[in-house]
Image (cartoon, rainbow, N blue to C red):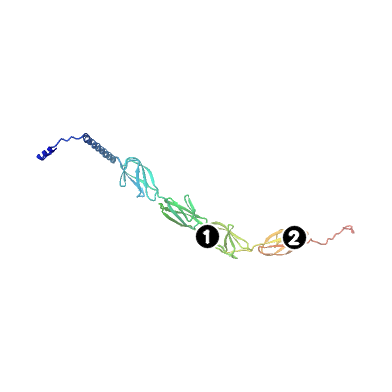
């Protein structure tokens, strides 16, 4: 070793020696070109396939409602460039999502046209609608939803119609638009009255007014509200005859009737005789046989009671309005002298 060093130091020249690689290195050098060839082949195939896809795909744009909906496509390879999808012909599952809308999933068929625009409409979530109706207890119905105002309900987005009714008001339909997306809206409406105010002046005043035999709680002259249509109106005051008429009422058209003078109510005259079966006339009019109950106007009346074989009774009776008077009589048998002439004379009678 010392001699070699000395020789190197003496001449200062390093001579190259032959390199002999190991077997593993030689194998790697042999496989490297093959791998590069495989990678290049794959890249060529990928590029070729992509170019084939580009030239055979259709340009598809989904016209979403709302415009900011997020659109995804599944069911096959797709390539998205902004709002445009590159898709080959066939069926795809297209999904859309947006805040305030129901999620949507539809099957779309991509046709042969190079450029296609397909609609994708999402359905808004229901809106919360509050109905404020005058009168407050009106009935509100929208489709299957029904209740008394004020009413709050979740309704589908879009055009809607509410049917509003009340027993004393004219029914109405209210059209409105539901924005949906959980937004709160208020629908207001006022129903027109379905009655008219009727004034009934009477002498004397203060008579009770009844509509179709039902008390109205109003006294004359009123006014009293009466629903539209034909109704029987009755006016009653103690001690007086009832007044009634059929009135045709038009909603919203107030009416004042001609003044009504209430007649004093009849009284009752009860005539009782002994014996019974006597005829009775009142002011010269025959009214029947005793025992007799007859309605007569208040005041004084001429009474005649008669029966065959009895002395007629003539007199007066005073009857008060709305009250009953009793006339009780005992008829006297009629008597007189009878002359009997017999032949021959002197016949004894007994």
> Any mark on residue 196, and which?
1
Q: Residues within 10 Å of mark 1 (few under 14, many from 20)?
A: some
Q: Position of residue 322 (x, y in %)?
A: 66, 62
Q: CA distance from mark 2 to mark 1?
A: 55 Å
Q: Quadrant of residue 336?
A: bottom right
144 left or right of 19?
Answer: right
- Element under label 2? strand
Above or below residue 124? Residue 233 is below
Above or below residue 116? Residue 172 is below
Q: Mark 2 vs mark 1: which is more N-terminal?
A: 1
Task: Please give the count of numbered marks on the rendered protein.
Answer: 2
Q: Residues within 10 Å of mark 2 (few under 14, many from 20)?
A: many
Q: Position of residue 290 (x, y in %)?
A: 73, 58
Above or below residue 106? Residue 152 is below
164 left or right of 41?
Answer: right
> Any mark on residue 273, and which?
2
Front-most of 245 and 142? 142
Quadrant in which the C terminus is drawn: bottom right
Q: Residue at x 38, y 46 (%)?
A: 104
- Judged from this view, the residue extending furthest toward the front is 2
Q: Position of residue 185 (x, y in %)?
A: 42, 55
Q: Quadrant of residue 284?
A: bottom right
> Any mark on residue 270, and which?
none
245 left or right of 8?
Answer: right
Q: Residue at x 11, y 39 (%)?
A: 6
- Element under label 1? strand
Front-most of 96 and 114? 96
């Amino acid at each position: 070793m010392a001699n070699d060093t000395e020789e190197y130091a003496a001449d200062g020249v390093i001579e190259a020696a032959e390199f002999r690689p190991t077997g593993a290195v030689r194998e790697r050098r042999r496989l490297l070109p093959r791998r590069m060839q495989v990678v290049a082949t794959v890249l060529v195939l990928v590029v070729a396939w992509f170019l084939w896809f580009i030239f055979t795909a259709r340009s598809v744009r989904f016209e979403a409602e709302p415009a900011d909906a997020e659109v995804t496509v599944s069911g096959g390879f797709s390539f998205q460039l902004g709002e445009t999808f590159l898709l080959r012909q066939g069926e795809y599952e297209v999904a859309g999502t947006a805040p305030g809308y129901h999620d949507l999933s539809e099957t779309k068929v991509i046709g042969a046209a190079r450029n296609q625009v397909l609609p994708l409409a999402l359905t808004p979530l229901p809106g919360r609608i509050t109905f404020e109706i005058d009168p407050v207890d009106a009935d509100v119905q929208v489709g299957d939803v029904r209740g008394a105002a004020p009413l709050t309900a979740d309704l589908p987005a879009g055009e809607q119609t509410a049917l509003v009714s009340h027993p004393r008001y004219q029914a109405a339909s209210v059209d409105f638009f539901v924005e949906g997306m959980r937004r709160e809206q208020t629908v207001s409406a006022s129903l027109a009255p379905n009655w008219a105010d009727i004034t009934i002046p009477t002498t004397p005043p203060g008579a009770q007014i009844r509509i179709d035999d039902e008390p109205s709680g109003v006294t004359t002259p009123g006014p009293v509200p009466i629903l539209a249509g034909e109704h029987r109106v009755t006016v009653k005051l103690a001690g007086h005859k009832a007044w009634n008429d059929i009135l045709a009422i038009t909603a919203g058209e107030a009416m004042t009737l001609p003044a009504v003078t209430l007649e004093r109510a009849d009284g009752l005259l009860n005539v009782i005789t002994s014996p019974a079966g006597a005829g009775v006339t009142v002011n010269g009019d025959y009214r029947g046989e005793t025992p007799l109950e007859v309605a007569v106007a208040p005041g004084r009346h001429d009474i005649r009671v008669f029966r065959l074989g009895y002395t007629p009774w003539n007199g007066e009776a005073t009857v008060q309005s709305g009250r009953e008077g009793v006339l009780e009589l005992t008829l006297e048998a009629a008597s007189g002298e009878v002359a009997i002439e017999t032949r021959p004379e002197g016949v004894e009678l007994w």
